[in-house]
Amino acid sequence: MRPLLQLLIALAFVAGGVLFGAFNPQTVTLDFHFLRLDASLGVALLVATFIGALLGGIAVAMGVAWPLQSRLRKAQRELAASPSRQSNPA
């Protein structure tokens, strides 16, 4: 994707997040049993969404990307070690 398009998409999401936070100013109390926090509803939902996206990205990386990367490295090592890769003098 082109950098300008990526920047425009990111700015659209930031603008949406700012509007979301501005339209939800109600105060909510977050109780973590050992810690109580007061925050606006918009901020609380945006933080929860960000944490969920971050944890989802980590889960995808651990479950899909890392095993595929390991398989790729193994295949590259096998290809480099195969005798057919050595040059034949002609």
Image (spheres, grey):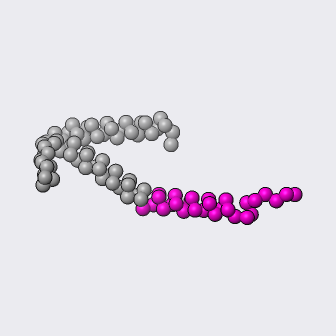
Q: Residue at image x 33%, y 54%? A: 55
- In which quarter of the view is residue 33 placed? bottom left
Q: Residue at image x 13%, y 49%? A: 35
Asked whether 58 or 89 is in front, the reply is 89
Q: Residue at image x 17%, y 44%? A: 41
Left or right, residue 70 beside residue 89:
left
Left or right, residue 31 beside residue 18:
left
Asked whether 72 or 19 is in front, the reply is 72
> What secondary structure is the magenta-colored segment mainly?
helix
18 versus 80 height, above or below: above
Count up the numbered dots: 0
User: Residue 4 magenta-drawn?
Assistant: no
79 versus 10 height, above or below: below
Left or right, residue 40 beside residue 15:
left
- In which quarter of the view is residue 87 placed? bottom right
Asked whether 84 or 58 is in front, the reply is 84
User: Residue 75 magenta-drawn?
Assistant: yes
Please provide percent x and percent y for residue 13.
Answer: 34, 40
Please provide percent x and percent y for residue 47.
Answer: 25, 46
* Quadrant showing the C terminus: bottom right
Q: Which residues are magenta?
A: 63-90
Please provide percent x and percent y for residue 49.
Answer: 28, 49
Left or right, residue 45 beside residue 33:
right
Seen from this angle, which residue lies furthest right? 90
Q: Residue at image x 38%, y 55%? A: 58
Please provide percent x and percent y for residue 15.
Answer: 31, 36
- In which quarter of the view is residue 81 placed? bottom right
